[in-house]
Image (cartoon, rainbow, N blue to C red):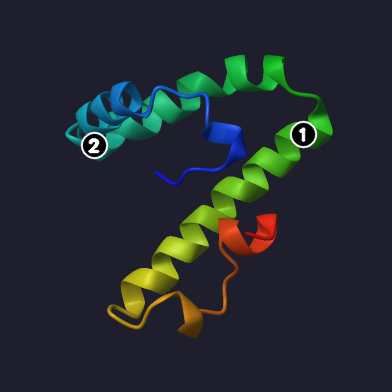
């Protein structure tokens, strides 16, 4: 997990425990968990903000695929912008 102003107040060690537990689940259970979280996420966001959130998830996936297919090449060689680039960090 990356850190930014948006995540400064989070309890990252506690979240890491949760993330590690979820990663140990079978794919179907992880996908079901993500789908189960959607109603509470949409209730917390306006439609445009939810769309931006979905775009962030898509970008995270694209970024991961790019990194996975170019191991050891580093951020400078990638074409998909990362969070740091988009946030101007």
Residue 25: x, y in percent? 20, 31
Residue 30: x, y in percent? 32, 32
Residue closest to the eye, 26 or 70: 70
In the rendered image, the residue lying farthest to the left is 24
Distance from Cα at disc 2 to Cα at disc 1: 27 Å
Residue closest to the eye, 89 or 15: 89
Residue closest to the eye, 8 or 38: 8
Q: Residue at 41%, 67% (x, y): give it.
A: 65
Quarter occupied by residue 69: bottom left
Q: Would you name the residue on which mark 1 appears? A: 49
Residue 83: x, y in percent? 58, 56
Residue 21: x, y in percent? 21, 27
Residue closest to the eye, 1 or 66: 1
Compared to 67, does 17 lie above or below?
above
Q: Is residue 78 left or right of residue 74?
A: right
Q: Would you name the residue on which mark 2 appears? A: 23
Compared to 59, does 65 lie above or below?
below
- Is the Cβ of the residue at disc 2 closer than 8 Å to that at disc 1? no
The label number, if any, that marks residue 19 in the structure image: none
Q: Is residue 18 left or right of residue 46?
A: left
Q: Quadrant of the C terminus?
A: bottom right
Q: Residue at 61%, 34% (x, y): give it.
A: 6
């Amino acid at each position: 997990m990356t850190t930014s102003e948006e995540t400064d107040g989070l309890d990252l060690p506690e979240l890491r425990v949760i993330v590690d537990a979820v990663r140990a689940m079978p794919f179907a259970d992880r996908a079901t968990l993500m789908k189960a979280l959607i109603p509470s996420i949409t209730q917390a966001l306006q439609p445009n903000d939810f769309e931006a959130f979905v775009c962030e998830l898509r970008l995270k996936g694209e970024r991961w695929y790019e990194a996975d297919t170019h191991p050891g090449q580093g951020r400078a060689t990638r074409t998909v912008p990362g969070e740091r680039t988009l946030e101007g960090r």
